[in-house]
Image (tube, rainbow, N blue to C red):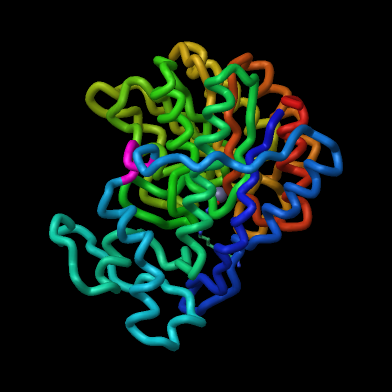
Amino acid sequence: MKTFFNHLHAQHQGQYEMFRGALVPCHEVPARADHVLAELQRRKLGEVCAPQAFAAGALTAIHSPRYLAFLESAWSEWVALDPANATRDALPSVWPTRSFRTDVLPDNFAARMGLFSFDAGSPLTAGTWVAARTGADCALSAAQAVAGGERAAFALSRPPGHHAGADFFGGYCFLNNAALAAQHLRDKGLERVAVLDVDYHHGNGTQAIFYSRPDVFFASIHGDPRTEYPFFLGHADETGAGAGEGANLNLPLPRGTGYAHWSDALEVALASISRFGAEALVVSLGVDTFAGDPISGFTLQSDDYLRLGERLQQAGLPTVLVFEGGYAVEEVGINAVNVLQAFA
Ligand code: SP5
Ligand code: ZN
């Protein structure tokens, strides 16, 4: 199995995120991807490739032009506000909630930061755009490999993607890599594509992108949003809208869930994907379901990821795996590569 590795991922290097009124060190750090790469190479799980550079049209298939233009120029605008900003991460501090307008693009930079985001935990840094843009190329390259006949491919990149919507960032995510991969498979002629999101957190961005579409099924197993981030989406009664009714499946589980019950939800998700008639599968591969994860609440063990990988492989679909969360930095390589091993 080929891995498309984002060699520029460390260009995105946040210093801090907002937590309980304080700026605390980021959980989403460059070492995460480096550990996964090192473990892939240690086990010789296949070729590590550079991504192909895709044209802007591949991004506008998912993201709005005004959001992409904002992301591309955000860092230079931030530094232009104050040269001292060059050593500080940009974080939003004001958002348009209910009753505010979102159709008028503000001139003010802080206002646009808020318009295009939903939390204060996702610092935008000097290299965020180049890292996210190259990560999108990795996801698109992996999708292209699978559309071209490969059984499976892995996009190894950060920042992650599944919280990013058509026109917003948040949850450490800026461009929705899994959505870009699913759309690319559609554009290559596959009629029905499924996205299975196994990250601890609900993939609100991916769900929102495909919610009204009948051609891309979204299934997610995650911490119950009544208590878990991102809180405002991911409930079981969200089943799709309009032509997309029936093509969205949320399987929220309580804190403390281990593989015995988590894997029951996996069977439900895979049965639905099979009934949907998916011709290819995109997996949003977060391993923050691990017992040792510092920000999450499930109790999966490292060996459970071997079983998860075997089960995904047995689904028998051409599969694009996209790296998402997982913050137990020392174990993230072992856990992610345990999933990949069945595809090697
Ligand atoms: C891709 C992904 O997994 N994004 C997750 C974003 C979670 N952001 C909120 C994190 C809250 C952190 N709380 C820290 C508590 C332990 N110090
Ligand atoms: Zn997560």
Q: Is residue 177 left or right of residue 24?
A: left
Q: Quadrant of ligand 1?
A: bottom right
Please report the residue visible at 57 percent of the width from the left and 23 percent of the height from the top. 146
- Predominant SS of the magenta segment: loop
Which quadrant would the C terminus be assigned to in this image?
top right
Please report the residue visible at 46 percent of the width from the left and 40 percent of the height from the top. 54
Q: Is residue 17 left or right of residue 168?
A: right
**Where residue 125 sits in the image (x, y, percent)?**
48, 69
Residue 194 or residue 157, whichever sits in front: 157
Please report the residue visible at 41 percent of the width from the left and 52 percent of the height from the top. 231
**Where residue 136 sits in the image (x, y, percent)?**
49, 44
Q: Is residue 285 magenta?
A: no
- Examine the image and state in which quarter residue 267 appears: top right
**Res. 256 in view:** no
User: Which contiguous range is marked in magenta?
Assistant: 59-63
Residue 11 or residue 192, whichever sits in front: 11
Q: Is residue 168 above or below residue 259?
A: below
Q: Is residue 148 above or below residue 24?
A: above
Number of numbered callouts drawn? 0
**Where residue 183 sits in the image (x, y, percent)?**
41, 30
Which quadrant would the N terminus be assigned to in this image?
top right
**Res. 29 in view:** yes
**Where residue 243 sits in the image (x, y, percent)?**
25, 21
- Examine the image and state in which quarter residue 81 appears: bottom left
Q: Is residue 244 left or right of residue 147?
A: left
- Examine the image and state in which quarter residue 254 appears: top right
Residue 63 or residue 195, whichever sits in front: 63
